[in-house]
Image (spheres, rainbow, N blue to C red):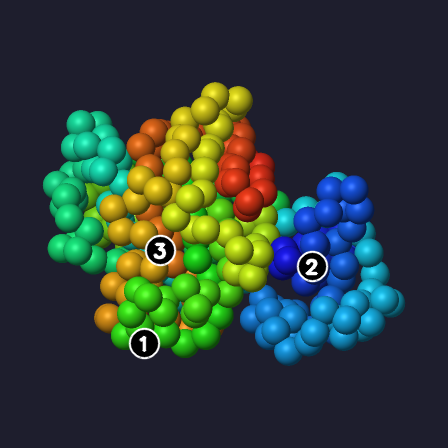
Amino acid sequence: MKILNFNSGHLHRRMGIWDGDLKQSQVMDVTDLAGADFMSVWNWLQQRTSAQAQAQLSGAARFPLADVTFNSPVASPGKVLAAPINYKLHIEEMRNNGQSFGHIITDIRKAGIFLKASSSVVGASQGVAQRFLDRRTDHEIELCVVMGRAANCVSKEEALSYVAGYCLGLDMTIRGPEDRSFRKSIDSYTVLGPWVVTADEGLNPDQVDIQIDVNGQTRQNSNTSDMVMGVAELIEFASSFYTLEPGDVLMTGTPQGVGPVRPGDVMVAKGSGLGEMTVHVRAA
């Protein structure tokens, strides 16, 4: 199931679900049934059999998928956690591009997980409002994990059972000497979407193709199998320091191909099994 936060016509920030059937392509509005945030919808789905859910959904308003625009499916995560150097080729890329400002640590276990402000989170329809146009801002496409229940010091063997689902993310990054969390927490510099694919769909998070095109040119194209730490190990690592709460988002790192964007650019992010989102860049 896909859980999304959408706009359609005069309706804004509605919670919907979509079963992924391209022939039907109908988003069902579950806001009044399940609640107005991601975790309410996810819990509602968990507490019902398929037959019970279908019965309650019989009267739900439906919207053609082509007619909706996407907000962040998780509007206000308590924490956004991010893996800084989780693809080997990206580490080499940052060493060579002259923009690292001494930030490069080549071992994620030494660099640790960092935090991004939840106020930086937007959806595809809101786009990126670029600040400090005299400096370089880069796109970084990532697989993101949305937690479904509290995880504290969990093992990698159990880690995936704590996951609600997965989505695409853009970790927009202004280059400079400041702390990583500061530079990556600008308003609109965390784009999530287009929806969350629930974990019960069986997606293997360590075998996901991710790609981003900018103005029609492919910049990043990789697979999560190239990660230094897989998703289960990242959850184990992060939860050894923090309690991961339901609705928290874990960004798993970006592959090689990071590059700059400018106002007017159009980014198209794709993930196998995760969908596609178009994100416009404008001046703040």
Q: For the point 55% across and 49% down, which residue is it?
A: 193
Q: For the point 72% across and 69% down, which residue is it?
A: 50
Which class describes the residues within 10 Å of circle 1: few (<14), some (14-19), or many (20+)? some
Of the image marks 3 and 1, the number of the one nearer the N terminus: 1
Q: Badge 1 is on which residue?
A: 152
* Local secondary structure at mark 1: loop
Q: Where is residue 41 in the image (x, y as percent from the top left)?
A: 63, 69
Separation of marks 3 and 1 at Cα, in angstroms: 15 Å
Q: Where is residue 112 in the image (x, y as percent from the top left)?
A: 20, 58
- Pointer 2 with pointer 3, Cβ within 8 A: no
- Pointer 2 with pointer 1, Cβ within 8 A: no
The answer to whether residue 276 is above or below residue 112 is above
Q: In this view, does 165 lie to the left or right of 153?
A: right
Q: Badge 3 is on which residue?
A: 231
Of the image marks 2 and 3, the number of the one nearer the N terminus: 2
What amino acid is found at the position of numbered circle 2 in the picture?
Ile
Quadrant location of residue 176? top left
Separation of marks 2 and 1 at Cα, in angstroms: 29 Å
* Local secondary structure at mark 3: helix
The answer to whether residue 227 is above or below residue 99 is below
Q: In this view, does 88 lie to the left or right of 284?
A: left
Q: Position of residue 95 (x, y in %)?
A: 16, 32
- The reply to whether residue 99 is in sight is no
The answer to whether residue 283 is above or below residue 234 is above
Q: Nearer the viewer, residue 100 or 108?
A: 108
Of the image marks 2 and 1, the number of the one nearer the N terminus: 2
Q: Which mark is residue 17?
A: 2
Q: For the point 46% across and 34% down, which residue is it?
A: 211
